Each structure stands twice: as C-alpha cells, then as structure tokens.
Image (tube, grey):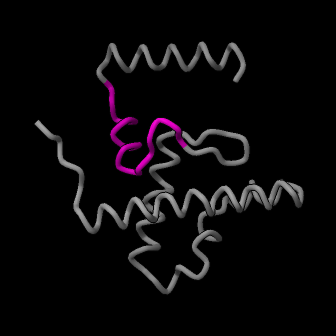
C-alpha cells in the first residue's frame, strides 16, 4: 500500500468515526469477514464487494443444483479474461478459498442463527 493510499484509508476511517458510519463494518460482519479481509488478485475486497459475494454464496447455498459451478459463478469475467494463465489460476484458487470460508460462515449462521450481543 502506497503512502497516498494509506493516508486516504486513514482519512476515511476518521470520517466514519466522526459520522458514526458503521455500515461497512456491519456488512463485513454479516459476510463473516474479520479484521483480515479477503484478497483477490493482489487486491483487498471492499466491504461492499465482499458483501455482494456473500449474497452470491447464500444464493448458491440455497440452490444446490448450482453448486457444481459455484466458483465459476463468482468469477468476474472481464478481470479473468485480462489475466495470464498463472494469474488466472491464482485468481480461481483465491475465489475458491473465499467461497469455502463464506460458505462455512453461512452454514454456521443457518445452524445457530445470527450472533447475539452478550450483555
């Protein structure tokens, strides 16, 4: 991460704290993302992108006939076509790892329900 990107991230964090805007954090928690986040093609997914991917994982989990090509349905075709052979392989493997993690989180939530705040 360059110095400019780092400063931009710090500025956004400060603005969220001041405005009490925690929507991204809520989305990330719903998608099962901890503080580590998800990296695809050497780029960290934003909370919005991760949440959209999580919604696709939920859809795939609820339609078992589509699970045969689950990772294929998560692929961004434009990005995939722009990559070379080795990068495509890394991209697909990173999506498979993300799918596995999100699917496990979904299974846990569907079995035990949403997490409740302990008082």
In percent of the image, x 55 and y 20: which residue is there?
A: 9
- Report the front residue among 104 and 30: 104
In percent of the image, x 36 and y 44: which residue is there?
A: 29
Place residue 73 in its image quadrant.
bottom right
Q: Which residues are magenta?
A: 21-37
In percent of the image, x 67 and y 58: which residue is there?
A: 76
Position of residue 82 in the picture relative to residue 117 (left or right)? right
Q: Which corner quadrant holds the C terminus?
A: top left
In percent of the image, x 56 and y 56: which residue is there?
A: 98
Which residue, as the protein is rendered here, is positioned at the far left?
119
Query: In the displayed structure, would residue 42 be above or below residue 63?
Result: above
- Report the front residue among 82 and 101: 101
Query: In the displayed structure, would residue 116 be above or below residue 106?
Result: above
Instruction: Report if residue 27 lies within the magenta region.
Output: yes
Residue 12 percent coordinates (x, y) = 48, 19
Residue 18 percent coordinates (x, y) = 33, 13
Residue 117 percent coordinates (x, y) = 17, 41
Query: In the displayed structure, would residue 34 be above or below residue 107?
Result: above
Instruction: Report if residue 88 lies within the magenta region.
Output: no
């Amino acid at each position: 991460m360059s110095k400019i990107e780092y400063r931009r991230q710090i500025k956004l964090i400060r603005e969220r704290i001041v405005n009490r805007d925690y929507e991204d954090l809520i989305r990330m928690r719903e998608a099962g993302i901890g503080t580590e986040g998800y990296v695809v093609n050497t780029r960290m997914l934003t909370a919005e992108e991760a949440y959209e991917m999580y919604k696709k994982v939920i859809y795939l989990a609820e339609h078992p006939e589509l699970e045969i090509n689950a990772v294929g349905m998560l692929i961004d075709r434009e990005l995939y076509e722009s990559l070379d052979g080795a990068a495509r392989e890394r991209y697909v493997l990173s999506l498979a790892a993300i799918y596995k993690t999100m699917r496990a989180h979904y299974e846990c939530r569907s079995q035990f329900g949403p997490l409740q705040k302990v008082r």
